[in-house]
Amino acid sequence: MILVPITFTGGVYRHDEVIDYIEDLGGYIIQKHEMAQEMVLQAVIPKEDIDRFTAFTKPLAGEVTESPLVGSEIAVVIPSLEIHHLPHSA
């Protein structure tokens, strides 16, 4: 089973059903942002279930996009400041 990172963007209406459906498919929730009337959900789901998940979210007016960099951190560091501004475990 190959897991593919996706981003779901939609309303907060019935978002608990979306989360349950992701878990029923065998996927995992990575991050959830609730902002007023909108929710952005980053998750990984099995590759063969992407079409099924997209069909499930269509009546909820949600948008599903594949996100290749979910869960990774990207930092752009200027060379002259790199030693002072790199993340470190203090």
Image: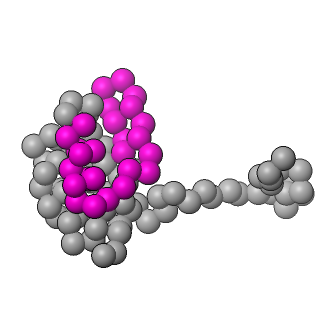
Q: Is residue 77 left or right of residue 24?
A: right
| Image quadrant occupied by the N terminus | bottom left
- For the point 35% across and 69% down, the residue is 3
Q: Is residue 84 left or right of residue 33?
A: right
Q: Is residue 8 left or right of residue 73?
A: left
- For the point 30% across and 26% down, the residue is 37
Percent x, y of residue 47: 27, 71
For residue 9, which quarter of the picture? top left
Tell whether position 26 is magenta: yes
Up the image or down, 68 lies above or below 63; here it is below
For residue 50, which quarter of the picture? bottom left
Q: What count of labels does the image hold? A: 0
Percent x, y of residue 65: 31, 57
Question: Looking at the image, which residue sits at the far bottom?
Answer: 1
For residue 25, which quarter of the picture? bottom left
Question: Looking at the image, which residue sits at the far top?
Answer: 36
Tell whether position 74 is magenta: no
Which sits in the foreground, 70 or 89? 89
Up the image or down, 66 lies above or below 1; here it is above
The magenta stretch is 16-41
- For the point 27% across and 53% down, the residue is 23
- For the point 85% across and 57% down, the residue is 82
Tell me which colouring the rendered structure shows: one colour
Percent x, y of residue 11: 25, 33
